[in-house]
Amino acid sequence: MKRHITVLFAFLTGLLVVQAPAYAAPPAGDAAVAAPAPQQILSPTPYMGWNTYYALGGDPTAAEIESTADYLVSSGLRDAGYQYVWIDGNWAAPIPRNSAGDLVPNPDQFPDGLKPLVDYIHSRGLKAGIYTDAGPYIPGKCGLGSHGYYQRDANQFAAWEFDAVKVDYLCGIAADLDPKTVYTEFAKALRNNASGRPMIFNLCNPVTSPDWGNYPEEQQSTYSWSYAPAIAQSWRTYTDVGFVGEIKFKDVLRNYDANARHPEAAGPGHFNDPDYLGPELGMTEEEFRTQMTLWSVAAAPLVIGSDIRKLSQTSLGILTDRDVLSINQDSAAVQAVRVGPAGTTETWVKRLANGDRAVVLLNRGDSPATLTTTASSVGLSGKRFTLKNAWTDQVTESAGTISAAVPAHGAALFRVARATGKPGIPHVVAGLPQVTEVDGDAVPAGVAPVVAGGEQAQVKLTVRNDSARPVFRPRVELAVPAGWTARAIGETPTPLKPSRSVTLTFTITLPDVAAPGSATLSATTSYEVTGSGRLRQETATALVVAPAPPHGDVVLSHHDWISATSGWMTPTIDRSVGGWTPISMLGQVHPTGIGVASPSTIRYYLGDRCTRLTTTVGIDDAVRNVGPEGGTSTFQVIGDGQVLFDSGVLSRDDTRQADIDLTGVRVLDLVVGDAGDGGYNDRANWAGLNATC
């Protein structure tokens, strides 16, 4: 389990209190182990499966788990490799041990106990995982702990015939234990279980500063890599990637980046673990495909956190894509590394066992982009290369450039190898339609474009030929929503020579009354290839159509926004984030405003109709119920990419009043940052938000 359920609720509401007692020494007979337990190669490639936590929360039942096991089989997930059915926390009875000291399942959830459930899982051709904690059970702080009972619990898990054990550290941090010491002890107990049963050990220390507060480096998840490879099959590399029922893309990127710090720690049988996959738990289809791409090249365990019984066929298709899974399951078990600098766009490369490279072109930004690297940059030499797109299965040939048109928050994944034999189909990249200007004003790079009724926008699309062969008579057709018009500007060259590109431009015009929401620009790019006829590529870009701008004197929090994000949960109108209490700062209650958790961006369309905005910003008084950690944020008001107001760092004892000139502003962003110390206790408020329009 990621959190005991009461502790999780307290964390979400900003009320978590961790008062760690003095170091709790292990009982006699359970002393620290001087040398690590010998490593076992139980899973040469990253293990795959499903876990109860994100989908079912803190109280999974035998019926739910059996139903999910059945669906793993009927959906094809089992046959794709997802074998482990993992019971996370809160499976134990309210008093977790009987008088003999044995763990007891909760009879309300598991009326027949755990052994019949494990037998059922095995009967479906699957494997079973269970959960415990490295610390002692502490009522009110954590739900289950094995400290003092390591060998007894390892023996019991083996007797129940579990195949894997996840060991948390919530009780461990509450008892101020040393994770290296206690995890090494547990590893020895697991290896020496009385049944001699091999069991995967997932070392799950999620404690991370500053997200959890201020802890010594040795107690944090980011330190596990230094000792875990010798004792565990996998180890968590950062804090949780989300909350029950919620995994967001920003946290996926955060966990991936932390996981990437020590690729040298991974190898056959032992893997860095960035946490679970989250289809349909808050990410778009494109964002989840990116998570699957990144986890696959990271040689990460692929454990699904969602309720698989409710997933769409699209999500199931992403989870079971053979080419992507073959990269994750590559026998070399090498973890991808970044080539070149970090930034909004990046290149990552994973060396495969046969010498091929898995190459990721990652777009973290909010607008589409064509990304490129070279075969030599990813460690391949030669003059001809085949590029297999792992997601589309298209195979093309390049003269050395690896490029792709990548949507916002997207990632292209290629398997790249030296080419032999006859020349293949040229690698031509049909770009994504991209809005570059709106009513004559340039759209800032990396910013998601916004259009509104009656406006005119310029759209550009670049076509690249990365092969050694020319392609002939390229043509692009742009389709727009009904009622819109699109007009091509300029001529298309012919032919498109090797290693050349051409950018085509269109003008689109929206009707005066354009429905707000999401619209799609679809492009069909076609070209002729000698011996292959006319080939086509379809690309599309989602475009935001803004709601009508505000009019008169308005409370902006009561006006429709374009988009809104919050570090956890969702922005709350006229209440502090979460909606439990009114907005209150320094004892003053504010009737209107927006409550968010950092980081957050709320975007409004003003359409050059407003002249003034007044607001009071600060940290909500709800954080005064917790310790001094965190509770710092920054507030910025940004108009068309220009900073109009910057609060500086505010603590729970500060507020700022702002009176901002909005003259000429078309798109307004209200941005909250975490002030560099993570989002711990950052319950931020935009109070008032009175606009004159």
Image (cartoon, helix red, strand yellow):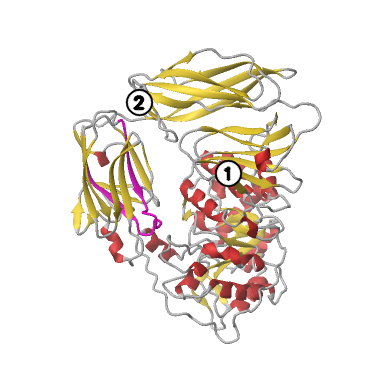
What is the crowding at mark 1: few (fewer than 14 residues within 10 Å), some, or many (at least 20)? few
The image shows residue 629 at horizontal and vertical percentages of: 36, 64
Magenta run includes residue 291: no
- Does residue 99 sit above or below 55 in this rendering? below
The image shows residue 557 at horizontal and vertical percentages of: 26, 41
> In the rendered view, does 620 fall on the left or right side of 77?
left
Q: Amino acid at mark 1?
A: Gly
Q: Amino acid at mark 2?
A: Ala
Q: Of 377 and 578, which appears nearest the observer?
A: 377
Residue with the most extreme top position: 491
- Does residue 399 sit above or below 682 in this rendering? above
Q: Marks 2 and 1, Cα distance to the nearest angstrom? A: 38 Å
Disc 2 is placed on an element classified as loop
Specify start and end residues of the magenta stretch as a single range. Answer: 666-689
Q: Of 614 and 560, which appears nearest the observer?
A: 614
> In the rendered view, does 126 fall on the left or right side of 660?
right
* Residue 452 numbered mark, or none: 2
The image shows residue 177 at horizontal and vertical percentages of: 50, 75
Magenta run includes residue 670: yes
